[in-house]
Amino acid sequence: MRLRGLITGGIALVVGAAGMVLAGGGPAQAAGPRPAFQLPFPCGQSWNGDSDNSSAHESYEIDFNRGSTADADLGDTVSAAASGTVLTSAHQGSTNGYGNLVVIDHGGGWRTYYAHLRTRSVSAGAQVSRGAKIGEVGNTSKPGNNILPHLHYEVRTTDTSYPANIQPAYFNGTRFGYPNQTLTSQNCGAGGNPYTPEEVCGSGYSVIDSAATGTAGRVYLLYNVNGNNCVVTIKATSIGTPSATSAYLEVEGGTRTTDSGSFAYYAGPVRRAAPGTCVKWGGSVGANAYNSPFEHCG
């Protein structure tokens, strides 16, 4: 059963860095290589995308739903399709039909739009990893525009004006099967885990490296401007159920610090100061492990 909300009126607007809506859209730098986008939902979930069930749609825009009732997916997690910087996190009020909107800038002239969110989980300026929770499916819009819950998703480039800058969506390296396709998410960067490495390590830390522990999870190395390193292992399997998970950090010439145990979501944070010193880092989820050499010596 297809359940879809309509946006009333075309949205010929560009959202600026401060969350302001600007008419039109001027020339910008040409877009670089397409980021490795994944479906904007947690790993393993199946969603139906539709691009032709709204008269207000521009080419390549997609509305996503799952379930057979109007509110089946209300409140479901929306995940970042790729890593980047949150450009906009705001309710658009009476300006357009987007309602609660998150825009992520992925660098190279690529941006993704996530509209009608019930709640927004990130703020403008935040760094997010692929798979990180950025909000929840909702039905927010402009006053008087009553829509059913769904995620409105767009991919745009900054090399030309709206709507010519709306690009076909690719997920896991494959072009979306316009106008309608059901897909299973391979967005396992954070494994559908509600926690992000930045959230676990704390304010000021940014991811500088990561490595998979098979398909069971991912280990992240983060760094802040004060010369502090942080390691966290985010689970992608048995999420919410305690299981063997570990994270460690070793500064060259020093001892190794490890956090290991039976954890429901992640191991860590393990923090050590190492300005100008090489570090060895890694972790495990179950029998799957990653161990780095001494590296990141800056």
Image (cartoon, rainbow, N blue to C red):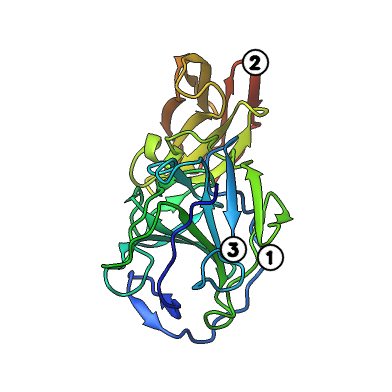
User: Closer to the N terminus: mark 2 or mark 1?
Assistant: 1
The type of residue carrying mark 1 is: Pro
Mark 2 or 3, closer to the camera: 3
Q: How far is mark 2 from mark 1, CA to CA? A: 35 Å
Q: Point out residue 287 in the picture as x, y percentages from the top left corner.
A: 65, 15
- Indicate the quadrant where residue 168 lies: bottom right
Give 89 or 269, whichever is nearer the viewer.
89
Circle 1 SS class? loop
Q: Point out residue 49 in the picture as x, y percentages from the top left corner.
A: 59, 54
Q: Point out residue 52 in the picture as x, y percentages from the top left corner.
A: 59, 65
Residue at 37 percent across and 81 percent down: it is 22
The type of residue carrying mark 2 is: Ala
Task: Name the residue carrying label 2.
Answer: 287
Residue at 40 percent across and 54 percent down: it is 148
Q: Point out residue 28 in the picture as x, y percentages from the top left corner.
A: 54, 82
Q: Is residue 220 above or below residue 263?
A: below
- The mark total stands at 3
Task: Name the residue carrying label 3.
Answer: 51
